[in-house]
Structure formats: structure tokens, C-alpha cells
Amino acid sequence: MTDALLVRWLVLAGARVAAARERLTDLDAAIGDGDHGINLDRGFRELLRRLETGHLASDPPAAVLEGAGRALIGTVGGASGALYGRGFGRAGAALLAAGGGDAAPLDERPREERAVIAFGAAVDAIAALGRATTGEKTMLDALVPARAAFEAAVGSGSALALAARRAAEAAEAGAEATIPLVATKGRASYLGERSIGHLDPGAVSSALLLRALADAAAEA
Amino acid sequence: MIALALVGHSDELLRALRVMVAQAAPTVPVTIAGGTGSGGLGTSSPGIQEALAAALRASDGDGVVVLFDLGSASLALEIALEELPDGDRARIAVSDGPLVEGAVRAAVEAAGGASLAQVCAVADAERATPKLPPDWPDRPGGRAVAR
């Protein structure tokens, strides 16, 4: 079973990343190595190429997520490629795992429930690979509150579009809240206190990806 | 003989380092994985995986010590290692030593026929090995590495 929303999200995310390429790179130049937008754009271009040219777009959601992860890991080049790539890959793996055993077949469960499984696995995987937590001026400052908002919305019966909107809002607030933080992970940590006063580029790109999800879901 | 795999952000940097290593230990196989694979600065898990596999083959299965540089290198390396078969991974040791000093020191050790653990240990030990002579004049902030 393919998931049209998943593919639509990835395509829209690619377009948003391309449009934000300069902004993300400028944010990264301020506190990192100035390649976040360039790197992420390269990775999403490759992902979109694979969606357009191969069978990936018609694969089951778990395979699309794992394929997205491989595309990003192979081409992004920075820490963000390893982290986002691992996140997408583990989201796909979690869907496969959840579909086995005595649980109800994945296809028969609500889309929202599957999304909670995938989202949670992605955030856990990113935190584990990065050995990071919130408050360290990383993408987790956007992703962790977004995951909580998403789960809360689904838990109270919201449909995917509304839950995704709540996640995007939480991610954007989380990204903004990185401005006063001192970076303790990644290249920005070399700046110590001088990293204060800047948005974290990874948190901004995470919020951008989730806003793309909300917008893609709203079109459905 | 133990082989080395050098992992980092710049293909140019690692090519030059390989020349330095060869000067000190010409018989030791060295593979490199530098840059994004498309000519840019960065790291690439698929490229690292290839370099690890090639080093392992070049070592005739004896083993590989990996030296890497900053930032995303360890993340990409971790993903690359997970993609390898368990048997291969068991014969690869990642050193926490500095890239340049660790690589040269490890290569000399490997050329002498040392084991995987021994080669990795000397590369690791370069972290704590002072480079400044003991009579070097005081620096602002004092000495970085205690003697």
C-alpha cells in the first residue's frame, strides 16, 4: 500500500528546503560551518530524483521512509544527513516492526496511530545517534516538543492534519526558543557563549519539514 | 598486517595525510573516505563503508584501525559500521586519537606487525601525548596537556 500523503510531504519538503537553502546556510554560517542549507538541499534533490525515477514512490510507507533515509545519509554530507537519514530510516523500521507479531496489521490501524509510531521512532533515533537532548540548541529543541504536541493531538482524537499543524507550531516555537541557548553539540559548541543570540539551523530545518507535513496534510 | 582507514571531511586533507603515513610506514595499507563523494566537504556513510571494507580486504582480514576527524565524521562512521556484517565489524577498531598524529603513529606500529588492539592503543595514546617539549616557554593559559 502506498501512502500518497507521505510522498506528497517529501516532495513539498524538498521544495521548501530548496527555497530555504540560503536562509539555512546563512543561519549555519553564523554559528556552524555554513553548509546546512546546501547540504540538505542536495540530499532532498537526490531523494526527489529517486521518488521521480524509480519505484520508490509506489512502495509501502515503511520502504519510502527507509529509502528517504538512505538518500539523505548518502548525499547530505553533514551531521544533519546522518541524523535526519537515521530518523527517516528508523521511522520506516518501526513501522515494519509494528506490523509484525500479534498486533493488528498495520494497514488496518488508523493512519494517525502509524504516524505516532513513526514520528516517535524518528525522534528517539536522532536523540540516540546525536547523544543529545533538549536545551542543547539542536534539532531536538524543535522535534521533541513537536512529537509531544503530535501525540497529544492524536491522543485527544485529532485527525492527522490537525495533529501535524500542532506539531509544526510546537516545532516553530521550539526553534525560536533556541536563540538564547548555548550550543553544546556540533560545530556551534566551539563558539560556547557566542552561540547565544542565534537560531539553531537544525531546529529551523526541523520546523520547516514539519510545516511542510502540516501543509501537505491540510491539502488532503 | 593491520590496515588503516582514514575518515574525514576533506578528500584533499586525507590524500595528503596518506602520503605522510606512507612516508613513515610504506608497507601499511591505508584507505581514505574524505568528503561528500560529490567533491564537497563533509562525510558520507556509503563512502566510509567502502573504505572500511577495502581496508579490511587489504589487511587480509587481520583488522583495521580507523582514525577520523571532527563533527559528523563519528555519526557517519557509526552508521557505516552498523551496515557492515558482524564478522567484519569485529575486526575494525575505531581510535579516539588525533587524526594526523594517531595515523602516523598507528601505521608505524602496524608495520612492526602489532595486533589490532596494540595498533589502536598507540593511536589512542596520542591523545595524551604532549607535542611541545618540556622546556617550551610558558603559554597563555598554561600547558594544554599535563606531563
Image (cartoon, coloured by chain):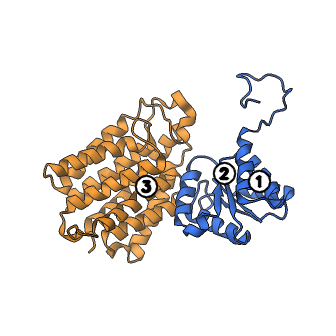
Chain colours: A orange, B blue
Front residue of B95/A208: it is B95
Q: Is residue A105 visible?
A: yes
Specify the amino acid type for callout 1: Ala
* Residue A198 in which image quadrant: top left
Front disc: 3 or 1:
1
Q: Position of residue A100 (x, y in %)?
A: 29, 70
Q: Which residue is under mark 2?
A: B95
Q: Position of residue B104 (x, y in %)?
A: 79, 52
Q: Chain of mark 2?
A: B
- Which image quarter holds the N terminus of chain B? bottom right
Q: Chain of mark 3?
A: A
Measure the alpha-carbon separation of dots 2 and 1.
10 Å
Q: Does the CB distance between marks 2 and 1 fall below 8 Å?
A: yes
Q: Earlier in the sequence, mark 2 or mark 1?
A: 2
Q: Chain of mark 1?
A: B
Specify the amino acid type for callout 3: Tyr
- What kind of element bears circle 2? loop
Q: Is residue A19 above or below residue B58?
A: above
**Mark linked to residue B98:** none
Q: Which residue is under mark 1?
A: B106
